[in-house]
Image (cartoon, helix red, strand yellow):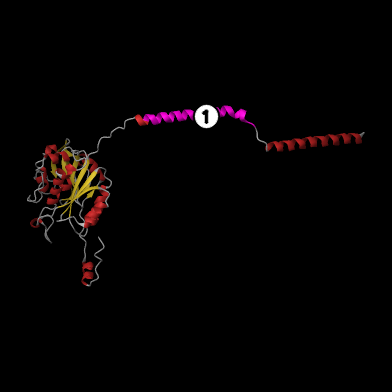
Amino acid sequence: MATRMKLKLKTVFVLYFMVSLLGLVYALMQLGQRCDCSEHDLPKDRTISRLRGELHRLQEQMRKSDATKQPQKQPARPTIFVITPTYARLVQKAELTRLSQTFLHVPQLHWIVVEDSPHKTPLVTDLLVKSGLTYTHLHMPTAKDRKLQEGDPSWLKPRGVEQRNEGLRWLREDGRAQPGGDSQQGAVYFADDDNTYSLQIFEEMRSTQRVSVWPVGLVGGMKYERPVVEGGKVVRFHTGWRPSRPFPMDMAGFAVSLKLVLANPEACFDGEAPMGFLESSFLQGLVTMDELEPKADNCSKVLVWHTRTEKPKMKREEALQAQGLGSDRAVEV
């Protein structure tokens, strides 16, 4: 009886094992078979196709809308015309390089460079060509009797007179023939090549209506000179030397509207003006003190500095030249 029971159990176990094994083999075989799921995927494919069609339709509508939309005209930004007198000296290229790279950060600027020379020099010509700026290159030599001689103090005679007046002449005559020259929107600024300028000062002057003014640092033996503003109007000037002058300001401390320059063809700098009166000789016929437009937060901020580069000492160079060992003249400094 016990033996017969053991045989039945063994048979059941073997049958169970065989069925399980067959089931496992079948399952493994099914893993390699491709499932026909198209019936399940069909609704999803239809939804994706419908969404793609809707996206394409919206994109087409946007393209048509952009094509028919009229571009909005931005108001033209007034041009700043910067007149810079320059003359040949050891630091000329260094000064002009520094100034030109400041101007590269100022949009809508036209640089008018006027050499104190009977002709345009290769050094300035090459520098301007490579500057990346919109520029005009002019030349106008200073009369011999107006030139400073070696050893003369810088204040003895006004400098840059003929060059600034040549820049004004170009604006009034040749500049009108340039593309866009019929526009009278803009400001005229006289920027010496050795001064230091904040970029902000150019945006301040861009909206000049007649004559705009601001402080200048490190000038006239003072920390700064500036117009004094009360109630939004210039009432006097903070200066240490002859405050009774009509406009006791530095050349770097004002800009004039292009329209005003063009409307007053006789306005120019007087080379015979007494010391310190050069700026007044130009401004007197253009504006009154009451009409001055204070900039730079009512003339409370210094945004331009009357810096000067120290004259290089060349004693060792001269000693080497005396021995025939001087620096190669072909190397442009």
Image x and y of residue 191, in percent: 19, 48
Q: Main secondary structure of the magenta part?
A: helix
Q: In the figure, is residue 214 to the left or right of 34?
A: left
In percent of width and height, residue 23 lies at 75, 35
Q: Residue at x 41, y 28 (%)?
A: 61
Place residue 153 in its image quadrant.
bottom left
Task: Place residue 303 in its image quadrant.
Answer: top left
Camera-side residue of 153 and 57: 57
Q: Nearer the viewer, residue 155 or 192?
A: 192
Residue 25 visible, this orientation: yes
Can residue 211 be seen at all in this image of the molecule? no
Residue named by callout 1: 49
166 left or right of 9 in image:
left
Q: Which residues are magenta?
A: 36-65
Q: Residues within 10 Å of mark 1 (few under 14, many from 20)?
A: few
Q: Amino acid at mark 1?
A: Ser
Compared to residue 100, the image places residue 27 above or below, namely above
- The residue lying at 77 percent from left, 37 percent from top is 21
Viewport quadrant of the N terminus: top right
> In the rendering, at what x and y percent does residue 147 appear?
11, 57
Q: Is residue 45 magenta?
A: yes
